Image (tube, helix red, strand yellow):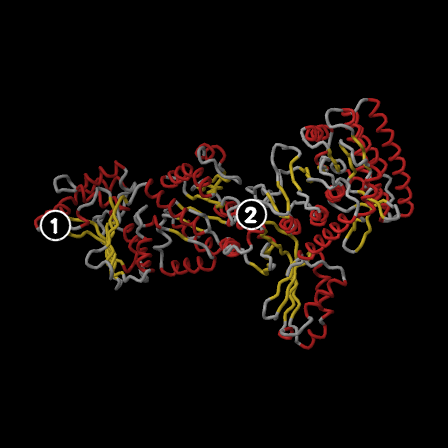
Amino acid sequence: MRAADANAVIACTRARQYSRTAFFSEIFTSMANIDPWVVHKFGGSSVADADCFRRVAAILDSLPAPRLGVVLSACKGVTDALLRLVALAERQDDGYRAEIAALRARHAIIAETLLTPESARLYLAGFDRDCHDLEGILHTVKLTRQAAHNVTDLIAGYGEIWSTKLFHRFLEERGGRRGPVQWVDARRVVVVEWAQLGPGIQWGESRSNLGDLVDRDFKGTLVITGFIASKKNGVQTTLGRNGSDFSASIFGALLDAAEIVIWTDVDGVLSADPRRVPDATVIDSLSYNEAMELAYFGAKVIHPQTMAPAIGGSIPIWIRNTFAPEKIGTLICANPKSALPVKGITSIDRVALINLEGAGMIGVPGTAHRLFGALREENISVILISQGSSEHSICCAIPQDQAERAAAIVRHAFERELQEGQIQSVDIDPDMAILATVGDGMAGTPGVAGKVFDALGTSSVNVRAIAQGASERNISVVIEGRHATRALRAVHAGLYLSPHTISIGLIGPGTVGRVMLDQIASQSARLREQFKLDLRVRGLLGSKRMLLSDSGVDLHNWKDQYERTAKAADLAAFVDHVRVDYLPHTVLLDCTASSEIASHYPEWLAAGIHIVTPNKKANSADLAFYRRLREARRNGSSHYLYEATVGAGLPVVQTLRDLRETGDDVTSVEGIFSGTLAYLFNVYDGRTPFSDIVRDARQRGYTEPDPRDDLSGMDVARKLIILGREMGLSLEMSDVKVESLVPAGLEAGSIDDFMTRLPQHDAAMRQRFESARARGRVLRYVAKVTAEGEATVGLAELDAKHAFANIALTDNVVRFATSRYCDNPLIVQGPGAGPEVTAGGVFADLLRLSAYLGARL
């Protein structure tokens, strides 16, 4: 059950009451040959200044309907200014006089800009009389230090009188095809009777009043004051906040209008708050019920209460933008034509959760009645209710500023049960928010709730309470307030109302990182257009400097930005910038080979940050660190992808993982894992000294700057450890037997010294080569790990027909021997080194991660 249902019942009850009244009362314009009315309401921002008045007039001139009812709010900010006068007078602050003068000056500027001098003089003469009356009323308030409610209503209503009188004069002077213009003072028409549920419209009396003021055959424009009305005793009152919208709905019903148009400063009803979800879109159409649900949970829609008259007459309501009248806006009606099952995501902030829990509640009738009765007696509003079927606990959400008082009330109401242990606790959880997903199309559509909770789960947002009505129109969840924006964006994207945005920080914009950025740049537009995926690179970190951007680095110009605007590198600040609450997913792309960067992986994964990397240092570190890494990933519900650590872009790790996860027994994995060493032994033929081949490879960029990093075999050993651990083996570096090709005595010293002395050992390598050739075999640098944990890396003699003996110059090749692939092992072969293929492997992992997080790839 949800508290929002009560508002829907009220609105529908009022609609039914109106329908009966309308049926039995005199029909104002029922004849088919009379042109229908269309009611337009313009809010304060639409009549803020003279240009806005002109814009409104131009919109009206463009409309085809010959009979218009135009309801205006006060000029922007005027109602607040009038209420501020009351507050000043109550404090006996004579500053209210200057405030009145400021209001007069503001309206004088508009009048003198729009009207002829004589018309402006007459308008301001009436305005001055109102100011004189205002000063008298406020002087009384100053003496008594308190303004009665009816006095506040009287003062607050002047803004609509001033704006409509001015606009009436302006339209009259413009003339044109709209016909006659009549000013209608809503106080002389709308009669209300205030009750606990707000102002109740006295339809019969109000309709009669309108008939006395406006001829039934009138064709032209009625300029109507919004917000104000009268009580049955004739005393002025207001219709509350959003009262001008209510006025439009009331006059739409009184005039039997064909439609009502609410003009505001947005393009229509949006699928989410654009301040929190920048990719929110305009909803094409809503049912009355959907609009009421969204409005109840905080969306900027016409207030539920104000729609009741329109609902009763089945009058369509349009929400349109005064400042972009060419936009079609949003239609609210009984039966909208829309293919969208979900219309919007909205939220209420600053909510507290009250939880009543106890075994004594199970099977005992009346517990909920006592709880909500106690809150009702103290006028505490309940926003949402949730109860498990076990009846062991019941919780409700209330405004946070009422939380402490509510807790005291509930503890008092259940004092005896708390003392006797039938109820264990009454807990308050502050700083919560309610997120609501709304759409008539959710009814009977499987999977919508699953998408909502999946989006929240992958964004590390914990759900504290859930509520859904039997209509299936609304799924509401209570979450921590600090996660509200992230949750809104995640659910909005998860339901494909906006792109999935992933906040990316790239570490190491060097050889691989540079190519990675170019690859993302080349595909970002396609990914956004076809798959609604926004890969937003918000930071670049090098060894000495970093570039940060809130909106995303321009990937087509990042090098220039990095050179000109980068600041000193700070790893902690970089990570804090990339990981922000308002973006649901954060990923770090580590394109370095740094052990220091890799040492932070457990910390980042535990914090829910995803990692994609070709860096081998973390997965080949000591076993204790490796286990801590895996545990951190599980605890943080984060993803860690590292396909490019072995074989660059080749599907080596994923293939091994698929074999094991589908139940195959992997008996061994062996291969050539170094493109550099593959090249050296593919080229070496015994005629050219081995040292010359190493020197040539270094000049071509095939080796590391120090060739010993390749010749030592340690890089290959790290790859073997990674694969061994993927097989489930507990391998340490000390378990791997590594044959280094760095001659004894050359391990230390400078690179130049190494290159100078390496030819001294050519004879030994030539001897091994000739010995192998004499037996019809070739030399290849091979790594192998078996299911028993035997791991070796070194130079091996292979038959000339062996798969490893016939590969391209720099290829990697991996052979998987398994129970399924025993007679003919599975082989993966291809380029296993180079920035393009390595970056491609990282990019593929990034897209795989995006799919895990909900993107439709």
In the image shown, does 130 or 234 lie closer to the viewer?
Answer: 234
Q: Whole-percent x and y of residue 850?
A: 44, 48
Q: Whole-percent x and y of residue 684?
A: 16, 42
Q: Whole-percent x and y of residue 542?
A: 43, 41
Q: Residues within 10 Å of mark 1 (few under 14, many from 20)?
A: some
In the image shown, does 726 or 435 lie closer to the viewer?
Answer: 435
The amino acid marked with disc number 2 is Tyr
Direction from residue 415 to residue 503 in the image, left or right: left
In the image shown, does 425 or 165 lie closer to the viewer?
Answer: 165
Q: Whole-percent x and y of residue 664?
A: 29, 61
Q: Quadrant of the N terminus?
A: bottom right
Q: Within the image, what quadrant is residue 559 found in?
A: top left
Q: Earlier in the sequence, mark 2 or mark 1?
A: 2
Q: Are marks 2 and 1 in contact (CB under 8 Å)?
A: no
2 vs 1, front mark:
2
Q: Residues within 10 Å of mark 2 (few under 14, many from 20)?
A: some
Farthest left residue in view: 774
Direction from residue 656 to residue 679 in the image, left or right: left
Tag count: 2
Question: Which residue is label 1 attached to?
Answer: 777
Direction from residue 258 to residue 733 in the image, left or right: left
Please, what secondary structure does the residue beneath circle 1 have? strand
Residue 317 appears in view: yes
Residue 479 appears in view: no
Q: Within the image, what quadrant is residue 196 found in?
A: bottom right
The amino acid marked with disc number 1 is Arg
Q: Within the image, what quadrant is residue 541 found in?
A: top left
Direction from residue 278 to residue 705 in the image, left or right: left
Please, what secondary structure does the residue beneath circle 2 have? loop
The numbered mark at residue 582 is 2
Farthest top residue in view: 117
As measured in the structure, the alpha-carbon distance from the residue carrying label 2 to the one carrying label 1 is 61 Å
